Amino acid sequence: MTLEVDLAHDQGAFQVRMSFRAGGRLTCLFGRSGAGKTTLVNAIAGLLRPQRGRIVADGTVLVDTGAGLFVPPHRRRIGYVFQEGRLFPHLSVRRNLLFGRWFVRGEGGPDLPAVADLLGIGHLLERSPATLSGGEKQRVAIGRALLARPRLLLMDEPLASLDDARKAEILPYIERLRDEGSVPIVYVSHSVVEVVRLADTVVVLEAGRVAATGPAAQVLAQAGFGALSGERDAGAMLEGRVVSRDEAFGLARVATPAGEVWLPGAMAPGEAVRLLVPAREVMIAIERPAGISALNILPARVEALAEVAGAVEVTLACGEARLLARLTRKSAADLALAPGRRVYALVKSMSLDRGGA
């Protein structure tokens, strides 16, 4: 799926000026609150009529203000999943799902059993929405959108209202939808963790503008990405492949563009993985340390420094990749960090997404 956007729209003092082209099974629109993410997805869905611009989804022109073309929402065949499930409380799960069929005619597309199996909701069909968890409600909402046979699925921060346990419950189903479903997805998020786990392509938005766009690993490696992502989630993504296993210690040796790293877990040689390396989990040493417990010590070079939320975010060129480290200003000063300085990156921990590369 390719998505082409050239958009200009003013909402009071807020000005949207976006132009990009993206492709892949799942495109993530990433940015802080107020960056323009929801404005953009509403324009794609037809819920907002832009003042100027052109939007094309997989060769189909949805908006072209220069040609006077605006396809109404009900003719776009676009599914929309909101932050809350928005299920009909008086209908069973089955009837909520089948409501999506009312908007399409003819045969073809996924049927109820196939969608229920894909999203793991077959055992919920006779339940009332009031008895479902937040994650279950969101899976039902996704199923209802799929049964309308959309050409494109928009997901506007579908995990934002869920706690960490419910997010962990639903993320594997979104991954499965990305990998096994036939509908391309545009996914809105401000979470680096979600970007790393889900995105093929990332479009970074800031104050109504496109700050960066491209493959997920490439965009997350850019020096300015950490500042946009917020203090807690800033980090870098590495794609790798398991080289070997140390059965005695339950570790896997993984080749990544930053160098080889050791990870715990039962992974098989040849298995592809995605790794999120949070900036808060990276320490910097100016000499290679000895006699410490850290397994992953990587040679690096300081590429850039920036002040973020009262700390110093250091971009490290590490092999063919970039890592981020977040230090106190005192630590950065004591180490005399400056662009070009050779250092060592000590990675304390990283998050693993199996099968992501």
Image (cartoon, grey):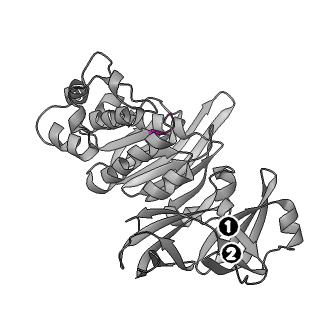
Q: What residue type is labelled 2?
A: Ala
Relative to the observer, which residue lies in front, 75 or 165? Answer: 165
Does residue 187 appear left or right of residue 310 in this picture?
A: left
Q: What residue appears at the point 21 percent right and 44 percent down from the top-left corner?
A: 117
Q: Residue furthest left?
A: 107
Q: Where is residue 6 in the image (x, y as percent from the top left)?
A: 51, 47
Does residue 279 appear left or right of residue 187 in this picture?
A: right
User: Which residue matches tag 2?
Assistant: 345
Q: What residue type is labelled 1?
A: Val
Report the disc number at residue 282.
1
Q: In which quarter of the image is the N terminus?
A: bottom left
Q: What residue appears at the point 60 percent right and 81 percent down from the top-left corner?
A: 319
Asked whether the viewer can see residue 172, the reply is yes
Q: Residue furthest top?
A: 90
Q: Position of residue 314 (x, y in %)?
A: 74, 66
Part of the protein shown in magenta: 156-161
Q: What residue appears at the point 41 percent right and 57 percent down from the top-left corner?
A: 23
Q: How crowded is mark 2: few (under 14 residues within 10 Å), some or many (20 or more)?
A: many
For the residues labelled 1 and 2, the Cα–Cα distance comes to 6 Å
**Label 1 close to label 2 by CB (< 8 Å):** yes
Label 2 SS: strand
Label 1 SS: strand
Relative to the observer, which residue lies in front, 327 or 17? Answer: 327
Report the disc number at residue 273.
none
